[in-house]
Image (spheres, rainbow, N blue to C red):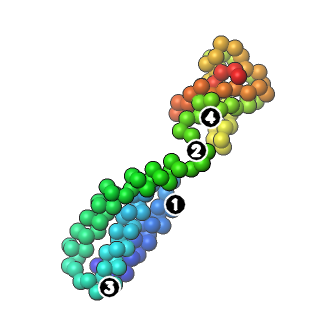
Amino acid sequence: MTWWGWMIIGAVLLGAELFAIDAQFYLVFLGVSAAVVGALGLLGVTMPEWAQWLTFAVLSLLSFFTFRQKLYARISGGAKGFHDSMAGETIKLTQELAPGDEMRAQFRGTDWTLRNIGATPIAAGARAVVIKSESLTLHVSAQ
């Protein structure tokens, strides 16, 4: 394959990473590996096609196993205000929620099912404390 073919593949993979919801940097390392193979061709290193594909595969695997986990952890875990759990946060209810009942509400820009796991009803307009989250269900109780 020509050097510019590898560069195009690299650019497409890097661009796809931008539009993927959460590709977790897999496409970045594939794109960079393709660009490196293209850069080698541009610099005059001639390789048969099988050697180009082998170089691409080796570079991709090496970068996955050496850099991806550290880079992804640093970028995704380093966001200020990021919490793995929503336990302890409060949400304002728009309608009354009796013990054991469920309702729909928006929280953090997402529609959730709220389930009152407490022993007392939560009045409309009152705040509830999130005890735990399970899928798209928030288990709440009166504050």
Q: Which residue is mark 4?
A: 112
Marks 4 and 1, the one that precedes in the sequence: 1
Which quadrant: the C terminus? top right
Label 2 sits on a secondary structure element that is loop
Q: Amino acid at mark 1?
A: Phe
Label 3 sits on a secondary structure element that is loop
Left or right: residue 64 versus residue 107 is left
Label 4 sits on a secondary structure element that is strand
Which label lies toward us, 3 or 1?
3
Q: Which mark is residue 19?
A: 1
**Considering depth in this image, is 98 or 140 the residue closer to the camera?**
140
Q: Which mark is residue 82?
A: 2
Question: Is 98 rendered above or below residue 128?
Answer: above
The quadrant where residue 100 appears: top right
Q: Amino acid at mark 4?
A: Trp
CA separation, marks 1 and 2? 22 Å
Marks 4 and 3, the one that precedes in the sequence: 3
Left or right: residue 132 versus residue 141 is left
* Mark 2 Cα-neighbour bin, 10 Å: few <14, some 14–19, many ≥20: few
* Residue name at image x 47 percent, y 63 percent: 16
* Residue name at image x 23 percent, y 76 percent: 49
Task: Return the residue found at the far top.
Answer: 119
Which label lies toward us, 1 or 2?
2
Q: Give the percent coordinates (x, y) of residue 61.
A: 29, 60
Q: Which residue is mark 3?
A: 43
Marks 4 and 2, the one that precedes in the sequence: 2
**Considering depth in this image, is 63 or 23 the residue closer to the camera?**
63
Q: Give the percent coordinates (x, y) of residue 95.
A: 75, 26
